Image: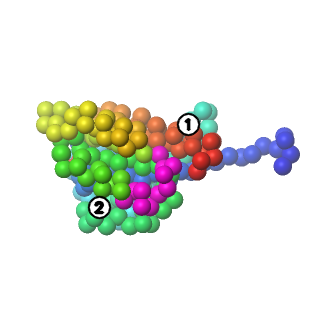
Amino acid sequence: MEDNEEVAEEYLFKVVLIGDSAVGKSNLLSRFARNEFDSNSKATIGVEFQTQAVEIDGKEVKAQIWDTAGQERFRAVTSAYYRGAVGALIVYDISRRTTFDSIKRWLEELSLHCDTTVARMLVGNKCDLENIREVSVEDGKSLAEAEGLFFMETSALDSTNVQTAFEIVIREIYNNISRKVL
Ligand code: GDP
Ligand code: MG
């Protein structure tokens, strides 16, 4: 290739949302992609994704973010769901301890389908529900440290940290690609 030849670079990264039913995965995605929140959202069956562009270092980077759309209720997230994913947000609900206890299982499942370079963010959603909190910030942080994950508490309801959580994952993927570890 000639030195002066421009390389048209376009990035499209697959990112998956995982975590127990009703932790807020679909609402995190709708908040991020459409700035919408749905208090009556019902889990629908089938896989859905949304493509969202973010700017990183002056480049447009597109993330194709996949939502389980309810299949996790049957503990049957398919391998097709994970295939090709280079990033994951692993979500629990800070007001339901059981959803935090499930994180280890989600991490195991992720590691079965994706290689170790997948960018992973532990997300404690519903941080607006402080008055009924069952998982402390410290518990979230220490699990993330032990497992080598990014960590953030979010609220899809009031928008806290939603944009930031997705952007950190997308930036990490972009950095991984730049370092050619993917
Ligand atoms: P999913 O099953 O993980 O996709 O969860 P949903 O996005 O369908 O949300 C499940 C329920 O939690 C819905 O009733 C949402 O309105 C509610 N929810 C989602 N995110 C939040 C949040 O950040 N705060 C609060 N208070 N409720 C939320
Ligand atoms: Mg959902």
Q: Nearer the viewer, mark 2 or mark 1?
A: 2
Q: Is mark 1 within 8 Å of ligand 1?
A: no
Q: Is residue 177 left or right of residue 34?
A: right
Q: Residue 134 location in percent, x, y? A: 16, 39
Instruction: Identify the residue at horizontal 28%, vertical 64% (top origin).
Output: 75
Q: Residue 116 location in percent, x, y? A: 48, 52
The amino acid type, in three-letter code, at marker 2 is: Glu
Is 118 magenta? The answer is yes
Q: Is residue 164 left or right of residue 72?
A: right
Q: Quadrant of residue 44?
A: bottom left
Q: Secondary structure at mark 2?
A: helix
Is 131 magenta? The answer is no
Q: Is residue 2 left or right of residue 178?
A: right
Which of the labelled discs sits on residue 152, or is there none?
Answer: none
- Residue 129 seen from this side: no
Q: Is mark 2 within 8 Å of ligand 1?
A: yes
Residue count near mark 2 (Cα–Cα under 10 Å), binned few <14, some 14–19, many ≥20: some
Q: What residue did someone put label 1 on?
A: 55
Instruction: Identify the residue at horizontal 31%, vertical 35% (top origin).
Output: 141
Q: Quadrant of residue 146?
A: top left
Question: Is 159 located above or below residue 49 in the figure?
Answer: above
Q: Nearer the viewer, residue 90 or 35?
A: 90
- Residue 145 seen from this side: yes
Point out the stretch of residues depicted in magenta: 109-119
Q: What residue did someone put label 2 on?
A: 72
The amino acid type, in three-letter code, at marker 1 is: Glu
Q: Is residue 157 left or right of residue 83?
A: left
Question: Is 156 located above or below residue 113 in the figure?
Answer: above
Residue count near mark 1 (Cα–Cα under 10 Å), binned few <14, some 14–19, many ≥20: few
